[in-house]
Image (cartoon, rainbow, N blue to C red):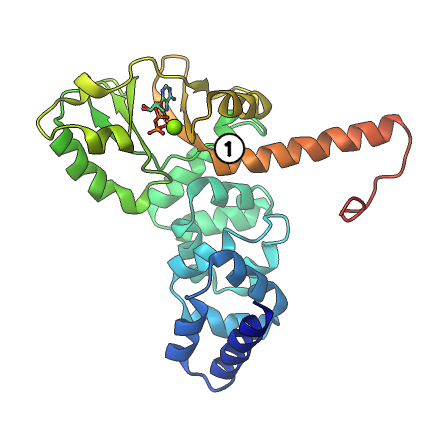
């Protein structure tokens, strides 16, 4: 509640003022990253710069994922470039790409050179896709297994991949050529016997979208099929990425406001400010 929030706020300010790193971390990391991001927006740049030295790149990445990417530029500019590159590397690749699309080209190039190769390559690949296509909103952090694995082997694999995966709810099955041949939900994995084969339990009729598909169509499919994520494939059915339902919610919001702007233009009405319907 409000009283509790004020108390947390006071403790955080106190910790920052007295440079009590442990106290700051204990209070700050207790909060959801969404609430952490609201605090970040309220603070002065010099206080935020102090905070960057108290948090790991991964912890800052969690905060940055909850700041509107159109307003995020100043945050990355005030960070030490090396630290900023590490933060980008820790972010979900699709979120990093959204931000990169807002920054100027020189800045993007310099971040990509400092960043570790694996993270940079992942982001570079995603930067190539045209705006508002499935490719532009997908992420490459998905979990795959092979049809010939046992359930036990698949679970062991899933456990090692889980920390970096965008979702672990669906595991996709690919063949030797990386073609998408099946899907299995976490529920299905958990209720299966350890010595069964993935091929016995996987769903072979996989609904997928092609990488060039319009994001509005992708949103419609997620809504109609009720999946938490959809796989994205190229024209030869190679699995390239996944789109999760949280990204779809952003698309729906974006498309709704695009439609509204068009409508407003047609009827020759001034665009309302953001709060007009609040
Ligand atoms: P259920 O609704 O059947 O109880 P669930 O709640 O565990 O299953 P859902 O998210 O509802 O999981 O997915 C239902 C089924 O759809 C799962 O068996 C899953 O393997 C399968 N599935 C997931 N993604 C796809 C996809 N892209 N194409 C086809 N099937 C899929
Ligand atoms: Mg279900």
> Who's the residue at 34% across and 45% down the image?
117
Assign a secondary structure to mark 1: helix
Where residue 250 sits: x, y (%)?
58, 38
Where residue 241 sits: x, y (%)?
39, 29
> Who's the residue at 57% across and 21% down the image?
214
Count up the numbered dots.
Answer: 1
Instruction: Report the image quarter containing ligand 2.
Output: top left
Q: Which residue is mark 1?
A: 137
Depth check, front residue: 86 or 26 = 26
Depth check, front residue: 66 or 278 = 278
User: Residue 173, located in which quarter of the rendered image?
Assistant: top left
Residue density around tag 1, few if under 14, some if 14–19, many if 20 or more, within 10 Å: many
Give the answer, above or below, for where 70 lies relative to 266: below
**In this picture, residue 255 sits left or right of residue 101:** right
Q: Is mark 1 within 8 Å of ligand 1?
A: no
Give the answer, above or below, for where 216 lies relative to 94: above
Residue furthest toward the left?
195
Work out which quarter of the rendered image holds the N terminus and state it. Answer: bottom right
Where residue 123 sits: x, y (%)?
43, 40
> Who's the residue at 29% across and 14% down the image?
204
**In this picture, residue 250 sits left or right of residue 16:** right
Residue furthest toward the bottom?
18
Give the answer, above or below, for where 233 lies relative to 43: above
Depth check, front residue: 2 or 145 = 2
């Amino acid at each position: 509640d409000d009283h509790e929030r004020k108390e947390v706020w006071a403790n955080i300010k106190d910790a920052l003022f007295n440079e009590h790193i442990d106290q700051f971390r204990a209070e700050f990391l207790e909060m959801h990253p969404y609430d952490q991001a609201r605090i970040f927006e309220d603070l002065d740049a010099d206080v935020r710069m102090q905070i960057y030295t108290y948090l790991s790149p991964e912890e800052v990445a969690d905060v940055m994922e909850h700041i509107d990417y159109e307003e995020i530029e100043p945050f990355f500019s005030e960070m030490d470039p090396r630290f900023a590159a590490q933060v980008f590397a820790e972010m979900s690749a699709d979120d990093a790409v959204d931000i990169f699309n807002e920054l100027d080209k020189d800045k993007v190039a310099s971040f990509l050179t400092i960043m570790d190769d694996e993270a940079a390559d992942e982001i570079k690949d995603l930067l190539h896709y045209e705006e508002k296509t499935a490719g532009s909103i997908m992420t490459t952090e998905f979990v795959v297994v092979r049809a010939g694995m046992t359930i036990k082997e698949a679970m062991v694999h899933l456990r090692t991949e889980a920390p970096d995966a965008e979702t672990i709810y669906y595991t996709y099955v690919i063949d030797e050529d990386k073609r998408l041949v099946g899907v299995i939900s976490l529920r299905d994995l958990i209720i299966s016997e350890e010595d069964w084969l993935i091929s016995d339990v996987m769903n072979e009729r996989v609904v997928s979208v092609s990488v060039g598909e319009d994001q509005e169509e992708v949103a419609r499919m997620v809504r109609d099929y009720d999946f938490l994520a959809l796989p994205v494939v190229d024209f030869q059915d190679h699995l390239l990425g996944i789109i999760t339902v949280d990204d779809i919610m952003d698309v729906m919001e974006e498309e709704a406001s695009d439609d509204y702007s068009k409508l407003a233009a047609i009827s020759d009405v001034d665009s309302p400010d953001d709060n007009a319907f609040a």
